[in-house]
Image (cartoon, rainbow, N blue to C red):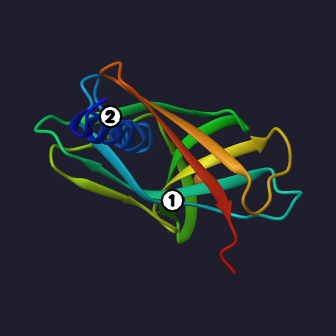
Amino acid sequence: MNKTFLIKSLFGTLLFLAGSFNQATAHGQAAVTFSDIIVPEAPPTAVVMVAYMQIKNNTDQDKTISQISSTQFKRVEIHKMNMANGMMKMKKLDTLTIKAQQTIVLESGGIHVMLIKPLKPLKHNDPVTLTFKFASGESTMLNTRVQRTH
Ligand SMILES: [Cu+2]
């Protein structure tokens, strides 16, 4: 094995790791990148948790998330906080579209990923896996961990 080959194979491994986290099209180019993913720790009795993140569409076509699922939760929904009759309410969105070359910020008080009914109580540093399905048929798996934010 010559040196060039070794460097290439190492680089390939790094790309693969980055791709599996940020995801990607079938040919390895990150079509949509996820960053600043936060799943704040909740009390052990919590029946819902939340995930915040930034989602960036690096392509020239709109990308629509049609479904999110998690191996740690019974159900995952996309929610948006809405002001209705002077009260903040959560509204379920069926899909979430990130326009071409745009970034969507999912944050407290805005759009968020609602993690419903943990299969077991989750605490600081426990892994959370989220699978995003796109209307195009592509899917992306994110691996993150519960974070203590206070
Ligand atoms: Cu919600």
State the separation of the CA atoms marked 2 and 1.
34 Å
The residue located at (35%, 18%) in the rendering is: 137
**In the image, which is nearer the foreground, mark 2 or mark 1?**
2
Judge whether 23 appears above or below 104 on screen: above
Question: x%, y% of residue 136?
Answer: 30, 21
Tell me which amino acid carries mark 1: Tyr
Question: x%, y% of residue 2?
Answer: 26, 33
Spot the residue most to the top: 137
> In the displayed structure, does residue 4 sit left or right of residue 13?
left
Spot the residue most to the right: 45
The residue located at (44%, 43%) in the rendering is: 21
The quarter of the picture where the C terminus appears is bottom right
Task: Count the labels in the image.
Answer: 2
Q: Nearer the viewer, residue 123 or 137?
A: 123
Tell me which amino acid carries mark 2: Ser
Q: Residues within 10 Å of mark 1 (few under 14, many from 20)?
A: many
Q: Which residue is mark 1?
A: 52
The quarter of the picture where the N terminus appears is top left
Pointer 2 residue Cβ closer than 8 Å to ligand 1: no
- Asked which quadrant contains residue 32, the reply is top left
Q: Which residue is mark 2?
A: 9
